[in-house]
Structure formats: C-alpha cells, structure tokens
Amino acid sequence: MAAIAGRMRRPDSGGVYGSLGGRVSPRIHQLAWNGAAKSGVSISLYLERLVEGDPLTRRRAAGPVPRRARVPAGDEVMLSGRVRPEIRAAAKKGASARQVPIWRYLEILVEADQEGVTYAAPEQTKQLDLELMSA
C-alpha cells in the first residue's frame, strides 16, 4: 500500500535504498510534489524518474561536485526521497556534470520537468474547461 492514497508504490526491488535530497526553495518543493501528484507516484519514485531521464547521468563524472555557498533565505525546505543506490550515484554524476551541488541539481530537474511546472488541480481544470466552452 502506498503511503499516500491514490499514488503508485515503487515496485520492490529487494535492494537497499538511500536518501537523495537537499534543501530547496518552497516553490521548487511544491513543484516537485505537484509533479509527483500529477504522475500519480510517490515523491521518491518521482525523483528517481527525473534522475533516470537526465541525459547527463550517463556521462562520465567531470570531477568532484563543488560546494558552492548559498546565502540561505531562511525559508528552504527539505526535498528528499528514498532511492536506489544506482539512482543516487547517477544523481551525483549529473550534478558533477553540471558542476553544481545535489540540491541545485534537484532544483534544475524539477524546474525542467513540464509536468511539475504545468500542474493544475483537477477542480481548476474543470473550471477552466467551462470557461473555454462558454467563450
């Protein structure tokens, strides 16, 4: 059974899962959760799919991931999920290829995901359809 009703549970691979995450802005956090809801999957599976879909995760790592200092705004929230070890390794590769830390890499993936960006609640969609039909 999934932790959130209506969401698909990740198939059990029998493997060990690790944490993938970072402190992101509340807007990115909401986009990620909206994207997961739109896809009907857990946040962990959503993050796995984003990392797997990134073409830079297939490249060889460019070197160590730099630790860029971010001036905290004080409103950052944790975006994390439990992912397979190979996904964690791929995320590190993708971050290294982009030369950004993991938290920024997650922000880039979520922002680039059109499902998360264009998510609308079902009630809003119905209202929009009615407005379009009456025009």
Image (tube, helix red, strand yellow):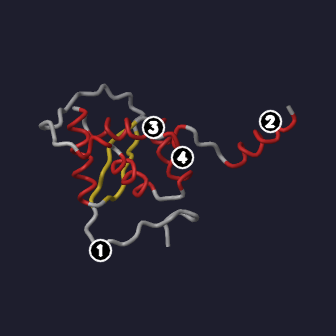
Q: Position of residue 53 (x, y in %)?
A: 37, 48
Q: Are the two marked residues, 2 and 4, in contact with CB atoms closer than 8 angstroms? A: no
Q: Position of residue 24 (x, y in %)?
A: 38, 38
Q: Nearer the viewer, residue 54 or 95?
A: 54
Q: Nearer the viewer, residue 104 or 112?
A: 112
Residue at x-position 33% and y-position 29%: 72
Q: CA distance from mark 1 to mark 2?
A: 48 Å
Residue under numbered circle 3:
28
Question: Who comes first in sequence, dot 1 or dot 4?
Answer: 1
**Residue mark closest to the camera, 1 vs 3:** 1
Which residue type does callout 3 highlight? Ile
Q: Position of residue 58 (x, y in %)?
A: 24, 46
For residue 68, which quarter of the picture?
A: top left
Q: Quadrant of the C terminus?
A: top right
Q: CA distance from mark 1 to mark 4?
A: 28 Å
Residue under numbered circle 4:
34
Q: Is residue 56 above or below residue 45?
A: above
Residue under numbered circle 1:
14
Mark 1 neighbour class, 10 Å CA radius: few under 14, some 14 to 19, many 20 or more: few
- Horizontal side of 112 relative to 133 (left or right) equals left
Q: Is residue 62 above or below residue 36?
A: above
**Residue mark closest to the camera, 1 vs 2:** 2
Q: How many marks?
A: 4
Question: Who comes first in sequence, dot 1 or dot 2?
Answer: 1
Which residue type does callout 1 highlight? Gly
**Residue mark closest to the camera, 3 vs 2:** 2
Residue at x-position 50% and y-position 41%: 31
**Residue mark closest to the camera, 2 vs 4:** 2
Q: CA distance from mark 3 to mark 2?
A: 29 Å
Q: Nearer the viewer, residue 80 or 113?
A: 113
Which residue type does callout 2 highlight? Leu
